[in-house]
Amino acid sequence: MSTPETNEVIGKDALERIVKDLSKIPWWGMSRREIEWYPTIDYNKCATCGICFVTCGRRVFDFDVKDKKVFVAYPYNCMVACQTCANLCPTGAISFPDPGYIKMMVAKNKVVKKAFEIICHLLPEDKLSEKETETTPEDK
Ligand code: SF4
Ligand code: SF4
C-alpha cells in the first residue's frame, strides 16, 4: 500500500515523466537522507548515451537541455544498494560508495533480522526452528 509520501509528485523530468520524492521513504527505520548512497558521474568518462537517465525508474537522473548532459537530480531517490546504472553505463562513468558501506548499514540496522521477521510466517515449522537457532553477524 502506498503512503502519501510515496505519491508526492515534485515535478517532471526532461522527458516529461513524473518525478516523485522518494527520499521521504525510510530505509529500515532510517531516514533515507542519512544514507549516502547515490550515483556520481565522472564527466571525463560520460559519453552522454542517456541509458542511466532513460532506464532508472526512480528518476534519480535528469537531462540538462541547456548543457546537453545527464546529471544526478534527485540523489536520495536512489534505491539503497542498487547499482544498475553503473552496471549499464558503457563507459564506466558512474560510481558508488564502497559496498562495505552498505554492509555496515545492514548490520547497524539489523536488516537481516528485520527481513526475517517479515517473512518468517511464510516458512514451514522445521525451517523456522532451524533459522531461529542461527545467528547472523549483525546479532553478535
Ligand atoms: S550511462 Fe554513463 S555514459 Fe551514458 S549518460 Fe549515463 S553516465 Fe554518461
Ligand atoms: S542505482 Fe538504481 S535506483 Fe540508483 S540511480 Fe542507479 S538505477 Fe537508479
Image (tube, helix red, strand yellow):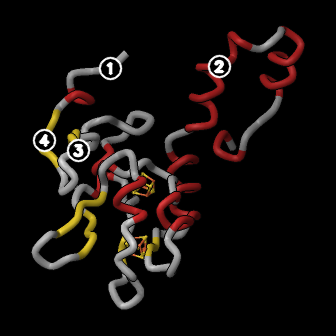
The kind of residue on which mark 4 rests is Ile
Earlier sequence position, callout 2 versus callout 1: 1
Q: Residue at x 44, y 79 (%)?
A: 93
Earlier sequence position, callout 1 versus callout 3: 1
| Position of residue 139 in the picture relative to residue 46 (left or right) | right
- Of the pair 83 and 88, the residue shown nearer to us: 88
The kind of residue on which mark 2 rests is Ile
Earlier sequence position, callout 4 versus callout 3: 4
- Of the pair 29 and 79, the residue shown nearer to us: 79
Question: Quick one: SS at disc 2?
Answer: helix
- Write down the residue under mark 3: 17
Whole-angstrom CA distance, mark 1 to mark 3, is: 19 Å
Residue 2, numbered label: 1
**Circle 2: is it few (<14), some (14-19), or many (20+) Cα within 10 Å?**
few
Residue 119, numbered label: 2
Question: Quick one: SS at disc 1?
Answer: loop
